[in-house]
Amino acid sequence: MSTRKTTLFYAILIAVASAAVGMVIASQWGLPQASSAQTLSVPPMNSAALDGPIDAQTFRNIAKAQIPVVVNIQTQARLRNRDLTEFNGDDLFRRFFGGGGGGGSQQGPQGRSPRGRSPRGEDDGPIAQGTGTGFVIDKSGLILTNNHVVEEADDIHVSLFGGGPTESYKAKVVGRDLLTDSALIQLTEMPSKPLQEAKFGDSEQMQPGDWVVAIGNPFGLSHTVTVGVISALSRPLGGVNGRRQNMLQTDAAINPGNSGGPLMNIRGEVVGMNTAIYTDTSRSSNIGIGFATPINTIRELLPQLRTGKVTRGVIGVSVDPLPITKEAAAAFGLPSVNGAVIKIVNPNQPAAKAGLEPGDVVVEFNGRPVKDSDSLVAMVVATKPGTTVPLTVFRDKQRRTLSVTIDELDLDAEQGRTARTETDTEPAVTGFGMDVEPVTPDMARELELPRGRGGALVSRVERNSPAASAGVLPNDVILEVNRQPVTSVAQVTRELQKAQPGQTVFMLVWRDGQQVFITMTKK
């Protein structure tokens, strides 16, 4: 053998040996190894038209082909130093997302798993067991499910279709997202047989009346198939206070334990993740109104979920969720009813630094037209933090352009805000379904009202009144009516009572240390 060939032979031998030793060391010392899961690509999506006949075999074939991609999830969480009675209320999370009324199922204390647990290893509370559903999206063991199924779980086990009654595999949380109530988990123990991956459809393609199939684990009954239709689109719901997520509504039966399971089209492709049901306290089960998070929304988040963190943009404002009426558009000086009305501008945040004010109407974001408040929110959260974008607004019937630098949304910090309490004093009537009273010095100090500001404090808001529909809350302090500062109850009531039925009235109020712009229409 020539010298050159000998050198090449030993170089290859050393390289192979080094790789083998490296794999042994990684195996022994727990160092990361290359894996297909590390480079997860977004699963392909089929946007072809949904057509063709439906016959007696259609749903049978979907069930047979797709049941293997669905898994059952069992969790355990120790409830440390918590009063168990707090998990028995009929709160929003139970009705829409958790134990007693949502898609998840728990034995023992119901509802959301507690935050702020004691250090691991302390045995100072009972164990809550929960069940849910998920579906495989990658053969490496990656599974999508609801965040509320695995949130705060100390132990996660996954059961596969066709396995024995005691056969399950350990899993861990890779990433999760509060806003969409989604989580990506991964098997840390793999079965001997290859996993079957789910196929993705196009949730934007779905229309009311389209057939759908749900597969899940209701009440622990594994791999149950139910059939229904899409009942409605873009239902604004959410388990995050103050933020909404547009959902698919379906009448396919969803019950506790279905959380995280797939909602499939007639090709057996996933178009949604079953997340919530609307029910009552007497039954806490399906009454034909279920909700699924659109799969397109979750699919876009997958690369971020894989990294363990979902990053969204925020500018520090609250917007009026109600659409702009023709009358309000005329009062704002808008060319159409399109736009988003700014209600609150949080101090020291990007919008405030950019010069945005309560009462501004945003009509363009980064050169794109803003149809309504939902479209503005969607554009902001989808923008990378640190990006500077132009905003076009209408203020005092004048078109203006501002530049705002997007910050990073912190949902945990945002949810830390506290609710207010009502006051109990002699009211004055306004004609908008709310009572007001004078602002005392003590109240001004307690509410941290700016010196010399404030005409009246809202003491009561009638249900279904114009004030309630506009978002007025007890303890709001009215600062301006129709852009004019007010300094007394008499001035507030006089200005409000000038409004005729159908007329739009603007108010600027003080709430939680912030100015809030409100648009009301008198009935």
Image (tube, rainbow, N blue to C red):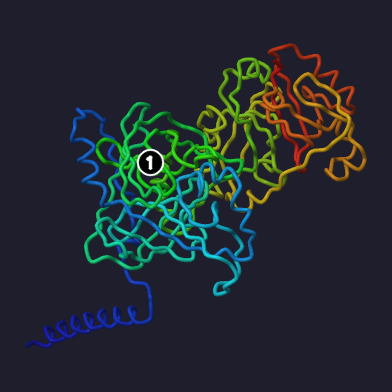
Residue visible at 42% across and 48% down? Answer: 259
Q: Element type at marker 1?
A: strand
Q: Report the residue marked by disc 1.
A: 272
Residue visible at 52% across and 57% down? Answer: 108
- Residue extending furthest toward the right: 441
Residue 68 sits above or below residue 2 on the image: above
- Looking at the figure, which quarter contains the N terminus? bottom left
Residue visible at 28% across and 51% down? Answer: 69
Residue 293 sits above or below residue 370 on the image: below
- Residue extending furthest toward the front: 282
Asked where in the image residue 395 lies, by quadrant, the reply is top right
Residue 431 sits above or below residue 410 on the image: above
Residue visible at 38% across and 41% down? Answer: 272
Q: Is residue 398 left or right of residue 1?
A: right
Residue 136 image position (x, y, % from top left): 32, 54
- Residue extending furthest toward the left: 1
Q: Is residue 373 left or right of residue 346?
A: left
- Looking at the figure, which quarter contains the C terminus? top right
Residue 106 image position (x, y, % from top left): 48, 54
Amino acid type for the residue under numbered disc 1: Gly
